[in-house]
Amino acid sequence: MARRNTAGYLAAFAVVGVTVVPLLFVLLGGFRTTAQINSAPAGLPGPWVWDNYRDVLTSPVFWRLLGNSALIAVIASTLAVALGSMAAFALSRYAFRGREAFYTLFTLGLLFPLGVAALPLYLWLRLLGLLENPLGVAIPEAAFSLPVTIVILRPFMHAIPGELEDAALLDGAAKLGFFWRILLPLSRPALITVSVLAFVSSWNFYLLPLLVFNDSTNFTLPLGVAMFQSEHTQDTAKVLAFTALSMIPALTFFVLAERRMVGGLTGSVKG
Amino acid sequence: MSTATRSRPLTAPSPHAPAAGGARRRSRTRTRLELALLLGPGLVLFTAFVLIPIGVAAYYSLYSWNGFGPLTEFVGLGNYVDAFSGDVFQSAIGHNLIIVVLSIVVQLPLSIGLALLLNRRLRGRTFLRMVVFAPYVLSEAVTAVIWLLILQPGGFIDELLRGAGLGFLVRQWLADPKIVLYTLFVVITWKYIGFGVILLLAGLQGIPAELREAAALDGASGWQATRHVVLPLLGPTIRVWIFLSVIGSLQLFDLVWIMTLGGPANASATMVSYLTDHGFKRYEFGFGSAVAVILFIICFTFALLYQRFALRRDTEGALTRAVS
């Protein structure tokens, strides 16, 4: 038993090392100068330099990227969860012909990568005048998040006992009133999960903003990080600081919502 | 609120009463309205931004078109023929397939092994799981930039290898056409292994400890119990992981685009990077659409076949079948 646990700890140690060392390299590299990094790429900061982080944090670029990403992610996840929960309610608590067909149609969306639709989507957005517009990114992202939202919410809403609905209807509530006042509050855990998933996938999206935005003042964080890296190839330390700072929102969010994310991902593939 | 809904459960048993018939009709109309209200917006959004673009891509793919002006130059399946007969596209498909195969051969056993180890009673297990999962949360863009910096010639990795006396292993990680694809695969593994581990850990949690204990009582060794009891029961989770992994590998783009743009000399081009290169950089919208349709058909066919032959069984009580 002791021997097996040693193996477990060794493996755990290796995993932590492989995962964390690259992140630490970025984080600590931001506290060095490019000259220090060039002379000893694997060294530690000495002396610690605060300029890189200060420069990034005091320049408007980083904050603008952050703001753009947040705005788009909020719109996309709100839209996906609002429309997704309505559709999931219809697909879980109404009996009507074609219900399964509608559900299958939505689940098919799980297979469509944005890459497939990117070219026509781009032309479509150009036609609608949504290029260089946050909505031009947020709306399609919401559309591509709908399948996962519905796939997670439907079984959850389905599992809420029918007696509750009967009681509400007997008490004179309309079916929509039941949805709004009883079902949605009861579905809160699942709603949080799907919000988190939609938010994170929007936050991390790269291809769509790449196509929609040409003007760098509209860029989201993923675009901005890639751009900053390619524009400052000589200033490794500054790129490291910039990258480190851009990891922080996602990692913080993850620490706060870890249970929801992991639960949602594993739940969605099991259901 | 309305009499129609309130009277529905009461009037249902007596459909012959004329008043009740009217109420029922009214309630049916009302239900239709509610359904339209609930399902409509989502359906419109989904159709307008997911289904139509894919359909439109199929239409554009029959034309030679630069994205501006009317579609006049009908070329039929010419774009498809061009795509399949082009060396670069052939090799791009090949690269996607290499990633698919490597993922299953390397990442899957690694994920299973790690999940089995992390499923034991270790101190700080919760922390461990979070650490393993962390790279999955980062965007591919950030991951790509991190690894660009780490893999710089004479950079962190090279320095580590030299420090460990393995200097002879140092390569032009991203500039050598022979190894660039494998370098990218290592980065992909770093980013996505945590997802597999978490998925499998959730699967392991669903396996009753009694089954293992029973196997041990019957004289099975730890390895035998794992091999013949735990792994078969993990089957459904593994099959879902394979599905997600294959679809993800076929759609690989962000990492490739930021780290190599598909280069050097197309040595790391994937289907989506090829599509982006031709569609957006060279304004070959017709041709790019044909590539998109091909990608779609590949994903779709795989999904259908996989659903039919691998996933369907999971709905038929994997537990009972595997144990008996």
Image (tube, helix red, strand yellow):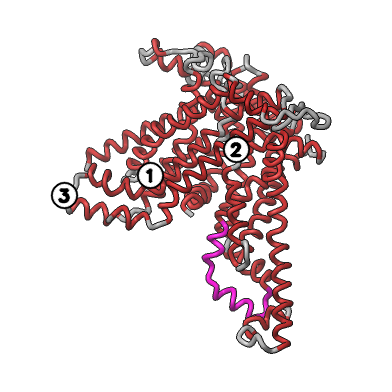
Residue A117: image location, x then y, percent:
67, 38
- Picture quarter with the N terminus of chain A: top left
**Secondary structure state at the residue bearing disc 3:** loop
Numbered disc 1: what chain? B
Residue drawn 76% across and 31% down? A217
**Which of the 4 image quadrants contains residue A48?**
top right
Which residue carries the number 3 mark? B219
Residue drawn 72% across and 34% down? B60
**Secondary structure state at the residue bearing disc 2:** helix
Range drawn in magenta:
A153-174
Which residue carries the number 1 mark? B125
Q: Amino acid at mark 2?
A: Phe
Name the N-terminal-most of marks 3 and 2. Answer: 3
Name the N-terminal-most of marks 2 and 1. Answer: 1
Name the N-terminal-most of marks 3 and 1. Answer: 1
Q: Is residue B272 visible?
A: yes
Numbered disc 3: what chain? B
**Which of the 4 image quadrants contains residue A250?**
top right
Looking at the image, is B14 positioned above or below residue B215? below
Membership of A19 in magenta stretch: no
Q: Amino acid at mark 1?
A: Arg
Q: Amino acid at mark 3?
A: Gly
Q: In the image shown, does A140 or B167 lie closer to the viewer?
A: A140
Disc 3 from disc 2: Cα separation: 50 Å
Numbered disc 2: what chain? B
Q: Tell me the crowding category of disc 3: few under 14, some 14 to 19, or many 20 or more residues within 10 angstroms, Cα based.
A: few
Which residue carries the number 2 mark? B296
